Image (cartoon, rainbow, N blue to C red):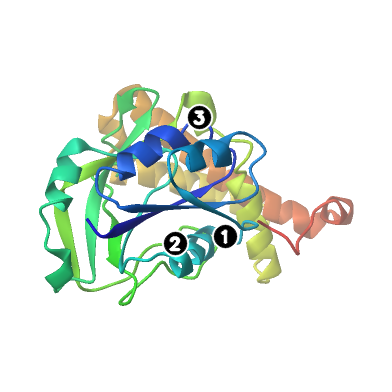
Amino acid sequence: MNITGIITTLNEEQNIVECIQSLQKICNEIIVVDSFSTDNTIFLAEQLGAKVFKQTYLGDGIQKNFGLQFASNKWIFSLDADERITDELASIINTLDITNSTFDAYAVGRRNYIGSRWIKCCRWYPDYCTRLYNKERTQFTDTKEHACVLSNNVCKLKADILHYSFKNIGELFGKKERDYPTRSAKIMYCKGKRANAFTPIMHFCSAFFTKYFLHGGVFGGVDGFTISISSACSTYQKYARLLEFQRDEKVRQTENFDNVW
């Protein structure tokens, strides 16, 4: 198939081989946009025939779009290093007539895992995301957080990708290399948003209620409760950090607000 697979990486030697092999089921070209990994990510990717381009991390959507300029195909499949294409999805994509497709893009379901446990509650499934798209018609939003491919002309495919989100519950409560709450707090602070003493706890309660009751965590047993607590804790930390930036000049001086990413 004339599809270019694009992966963004930073120190993904544990994932990159299986990720690329997964994309090779549907792609005749694979591009890796690497944020200057210090492990064997680049070596392993090149060994498998991927084209590697280095770029300091610019944020989610911007980084994903960076690879488009090197793609020789119009159709792109975007995959994160901790994701895999299933054989079922590969079979469906390989039967598509994308050359004459009237769609701008195709969305796929995503199975999110903690360890080996496929989580179906808390809106973790089917978690549709648009990953196969025509770069001449659309691309990822030019945003630094939670970017997505925007189009009103998307076809949903009845097959999934696998997302090994977290190795264990410990990672669920905070991958050190991500630290999304602090990043989000910095962005809010720079945009002029402010919190008060009640803001963190109010958002904690709201996030837990939403995940556990409205998004079905209550039906997910221990994992559903744990995910709801994790979401609430992350939200609490985000607003607590924002409040801290407001109140403590010494803390602000230790943070780099010019380079959030």
Residue at the spot x=17%, y=69% of the render? 99
x, y percent for residue 160:
22, 43
From the viewer's perspective, is the residue at label 3 or at label 1 nearer? 3
The front one of 119 and 29 is 29
- Secondary-structure class at tag 3: loop
Would you call the spot at circle 2 few (<14 residues within 10 Å), some (14-19), or many (20 or more)? some
Looking at marks 3 and 1 on the same chain, the residue that comes earlier in the sequence is marked by 3
Which amino acid, mark 3?
Gln
Residue 209 is left or right of residue 11, and the answer is: left
Residue at the spot x=59%, y=48% of the render? 180
- Secondary-structure class at tag 1: loop
From the viewer's perspective, is the residue at label 2 or at label 3 nearer? 3
- Secondary-structure class at tag 2: loop
Q: Can you tell which quarter of the image residue 196 is in?
A: bottom right
Name the residue beneath numbered marker 3: 14
Residue at the spot x=47%, y=24% of the render? 168
Would you call the spot at circle 3 few (<14 residues within 10 Å), some (14-19), or many (20 or more)? some
Would you call the spot at circle 1 few (<14 residues within 10 Å), some (14-19), or many (20 or more)? some
Residue 68 is left or right of residue 89, and the answer is: right
The front one of 42 and 198 is 42
Name above or below for residue 58 compared with residue 122. below
Name above or below for residue 88 compared with residue 221. below
x, y percent for residue 183:
64, 53
Q: Can you tell which quarter of the image residue 252 is in?
A: bottom right
User: Spatial distance from mark 2 to mark 3, Cα to Cα?
Assistant: 24 Å
Which amino acid, mark 1?
Gly
